[in-house]
Amino acid sequence: MGEEVKLFGVWGSPFSRRVEMALKLKGVEYEYFEEDLQNKSDLLLKYNPVHKKIPVLLHKGKPIAESAVILEYIDETWKGFPLLPKDPYQRATARFWARFVEEKCMPALFNCTVAEDRKKAVEEAHETLKLLENELKDKKFFGGEDIGFVDIVADFIGGYWLRDIQEIVGLELLTKEKFPKLCEWSDEFVNHAVIKECLPPRDKLFAFFRTRFGSKS
Amino acid sequence: MADEVVLLDFWPSPFGMRLRIALAEKGIKHEYKEEDLKNKSPLLLKSNPVHKKIPVLIHNGKPVSESLIALQYIDETWNDNAPLLPSDPYLRSQAKFWAEFVDKKVADFGRKVCMTKGEEQEAAKNGLLDCIELLEGELGEKPYFGGETLGFVDVTLVPCYGWLSVYEKFGNFSIEAEHPVFIAWGKRCLQKKSVSKSLPDQQKLYDFVVQLRKRHEIE
């Protein structure tokens, strides 16, 4: 049964790690293939000819691309541990915030590492995090008592990616002073029994970002 | 309990058009509220405080923003007729993939064809043509992306077909010449009342863009 599900990903990518989180939360066995993005495999180019990107999920030989689309497919195919709520309005709300994380938060956070006007970039990033903090309110996770769709899509923020980047580049983005609830959430996220198994190796990720962004101390 | 459905929209918006078509396809009674984007209503600002954009679907007082999210909400809530998404998870994933493709690429290229000039416009024109070619490949021999009936991708894409002659005029190129399959698909969709009554008059759209370009000083 395990051979039916294959995942093409990259060890450091929050996008492919999302898919692994979903599969592990649902107890789905899969075979993982590490891609070299400088030298993409023929299989990747065949399975995602439109975007040529990871992650790609292959189920019974049929490929699915785009992490949010893959997450919804996984949720619809394996019923254990639902990622999205049942109620259509709650589903729409979860999709809205997942999209917000992808289209507003993440670009604003990345922009802080390259923008000329860093102060302005950080302010804009803070605005997006503030909205996210307000949405979390007093919940343990965006999904409620346990991990859900939005938590997984926000893995870049909850996991070590953002923390490492802000430390290396010298940015104050996700701070306890400004975003106490998000910080608490991110601690819950990285300590979650299943999620912690899905995060990239800490040292390797830190070293990778250090090389990429240089070191500031 | 009677459902109360309100659509906050702006007549030229291809995103709003998607919801108009979906509501019409499913025969959902609703109130259409035209927004003045230079003077947004308190209802719009309250219903979509994060983005302050249209379209917003308000169902029994609860707002849903982002057109693709609202389309899925409509499909899941009024699930007894005219389904937009198929029931098979794999086919659903493919429909969502292509709808995202249209949403992220086609609308943006179309906007740039109308609102930029020079190299940026050329790049947008080529981008748009590339997208249409890929979409024709996905359509294949099917009458609609949804198969025998209008589906999620059709509803997402057909507003861009509604803007086509406007793109061609401002971009000074012919999409029709290179892409007869796309044109045939568009015409087929237009035969549906839900589509034809949801797409504005092309001349009106053209005049609107002329005004917009003047305001943004593009010449």
Image (cartoon, rainbow, N blue to C red):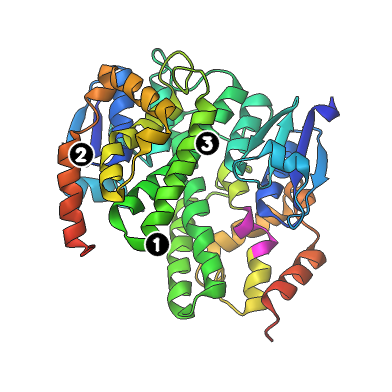
- Callout 1 amino acid: Glu
Residue A131, horizontal then vertical, whole percent: 43, 58
Residue where numbered disc 2 is placed: B11
Residue drawn at 66 percent across, 25 percent down:
A77
Label 3 element class: helix
Q: Disc 1 and disc 3: Cα gap in Å?
A: 23 Å
> Which sits earlier in the primary sequence, circle 1 or circle 3?
1
Magenta highlight range: A155-161
> Which sits earlier in the primary sequence, circle 2 or circle 1?
2
Residue B148, horizontal then vertical, whole percent: 45, 13
Please state the chain letter of the residue tagged with numbered disc 1 in the rendered image.
B
Q: Disc 3 and disc 2: Cα gap in Å?
A: 28 Å
Residue drawn at 81 percent across, 33 percent down:
A29
Q: Disc 2 and disc 1: Cα gap in Å?
A: 29 Å
Please state the chain letter of the residue tagged with numbered disc 3 in the rendered image.
B
Residue where numbered disc 1 is placed: B119
